Image (spheres, rainbow, N blue to C red):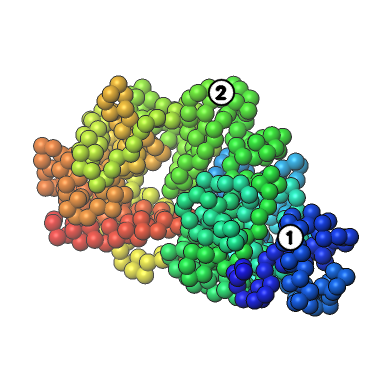
Amino acid sequence: MFDISKEVCCFMRIIDYDILNVIVSEPFSSQRILAEMSGYSLGKVNQTLRTLRNGGYVCNAISPTDKAHDELKEKRPQNAIILAAGYGMRMAPINMEMPKGLVTVYGEPLIERLITQLNSVGVTDITVVVGFMKEQYDYLTDKFSVKLAVNMDYASKNNLHSLSLVKGKLNNTYVLPCDIWCKDNPFCRNEWYSWYMVTDMADEDRAVRLTRNRELIKTAGSGGGATTGIAYLQGEACKKVREKLTACANSKKYRDSVWEEALYGDGDKMIVAAKIIPSSSFFKINTYEQLRELDESSKALKSNVMKMIAKEFRCVPECIKDISILKKGMTNRSFIFTHENTRYIMRIPGEGTDKLIDRNKEHAVYQEISRLKISDDVVFINPQSGYKITVFLEDARACSPLCIADVKECMKELRRFHKLKLYVEHTFDVFERLEFYESLWSTPFSCFRDYENTKANVMRLKEYIDAAEKEHILSHIDAVPDNFLFVSRGGKEEIRLIDWEYAGMQDPHIDIAMFAIYSLYDREQVDTLIDCYFDEGCPRDVRIKIYAYIAVCGLMWSNWCEYKRQMGVELGEYAMRQYRYAKDYYRVFNAER
């Protein structure tokens, strides 16, 4: 017996409801035809017919009774929720120009096809949860009379939070993502029980496995079908999902969770049954490559970014292959692609970056350092848009801030760069940037209650720093562990220092402070870092100056983080720790001075 939830009564199984649905939906002349239409064996059909008669769902003529029609009316779909708030990060570069739900397949936007399929089975009450590029979905309210709900936290939380915003609508409801394409309509006018849809194709990335009883069990191993993100929820399942959404949405543990987390009970079993569809009828479109495989004529493939890459390499866009997203950085979004057996990185500026970085200044820095071969190899850089293409450094690894051997080598390389005493026309003024980042806030108040006092203390350090003895040379400014890459060359490792977008004329010792606060170092680790840079010993006045830089840079990056937060990019612990550096190292400076 299949007993997923209380909504399935003690004598009715999923198979019984499936066959009853065929009886209600389609006329037939024999049990054999019923078996063909339902997909179950003739023996199971005959067994089920006895169950349905005993339960009062069909009469002897194998026609649905009033009881069947009344129950169906109670369980029939009433509405749908489409989740469309996310970045669709893996859709780069398409997501630079449109949200993933508006990607076209065979001339039709994905979300429009889903809405049309829902409408065709009588579901017209549709809510679309939007976030990223939300304005582009507005036309749907006029064209299809859908309702839009806005998830303002789309950048920092996954779609579990999107569904929790509209959990009150869960009542005989289809829940589905916007980035899928179904050849056959996955929705139906008649639904008898709650289910979650999987395909019959094994999936290496699956999060569930399918049992013989059509139960879905959470797993990290093999044995399940590919998940689709589509579900139908009614009755007791709606109540349980609403309760789970409330609990999860208020917990930091579930910030990155997909909404399916709410389908699990106390253990690892979903509270709903599996609905299985042929893999040939379902496509989930996560990447540019997947879209190209499904519909090579899609308008979305003709992105301006791809045209620009093709122009730079003097090829057609089809020659740009193996596109995959890199982890999103704090400033930019990037993806890898291959052209003629060489891999490259395409950098695309992130939200609000045009206000944070002067790309003409960045371009000037790359011109100055290009002859030195100390960075990655720049193939293309546009000082207007900020787009940049570099050769991907194969077999490279970033510096580990907890590995003292790595840190020593990086500080040696950093000092070697500083000794070049390079020059550009512009300066990076940390106090000016501190004020500038604050001026970008959409509200005049910091999220930190003692901000004004902390800022006043930090600004008191300006007089000391200005008076301190120092050089004024090209400094990296963002010399953090992630930007030191160890690259294997001829059996040896050499270091490349990448990402020069903040670089400018400054006291080079500020780079030490930047490395320390990005690494979230404590006081002992900070002093060890300083000693790694000054292998001959650090003068006391220089060490104190670096403490001052840590305080100032901490507040500067804290203000930067606050701006990014208001832009929808949540940086978590990093943002809080930067503010703490401002407070703590103002005290350290005063204690050591």
Choose mark 1 or mark 2, whichever is in front.
Answer: 1
State the residue at coordinates (64%, 63%).
195
Amino acid beneath label 1? Gly
Residue 164, picture quadrant: bottom right
Label at residue 43: 1
Q: In this picture, is 56 found above or below 403?
A: below
Q: Which residue is mark 2?
A: 313
* Depth check, front residue: 231 or 78: 231
Taking the image as shown, residue 417 lies to the left or right of residue 276, namely left
* Depth check, front residue: 357 or 512: 512
Q: Quadrant of the N terminus?
A: bottom right
Q: Quadrant of the C terminus?
A: bottom left
Q: At which x and y percent is residue 152?
A: 55, 62
How far is mark 1 from mark 2, CA to CA? 63 Å
Q: Mark 2 or mark 1, which is nearer the start of the sequence?
A: 1
Residue furthest front in the image: 43
State the residue at coordinates (64%, 40%).
291
Amino acid beneath label 2? Phe
Residue 390, picture quadrant: top left
- Can residue 367 be seen here? The reply is no
State the residue at coordinates (62%, 54%).
198
Disc 1 on helix, strand or loop? Answer: helix
Q: At which x and y percent is residue 114?
A: 73, 54
Q: How many marks?
A: 2
Disc 2 on helix, strand or loop? Answer: helix
Taking the image as shown, residue 547 lies to the left or right of residue 173, namely left
Q: At which x and y percent is residue 292?
A: 65, 36
Taking the image as shown, residue 314 lies to the left or right of residue 433, namely right
Q: Within 10 angstroms of label 1, few (less than 14), some, or many (20 or more) residues?
A: few
* Depth check, front residue: 153 or 233: 233
Q: At which x and y percent is residue 499?
A: 39, 37
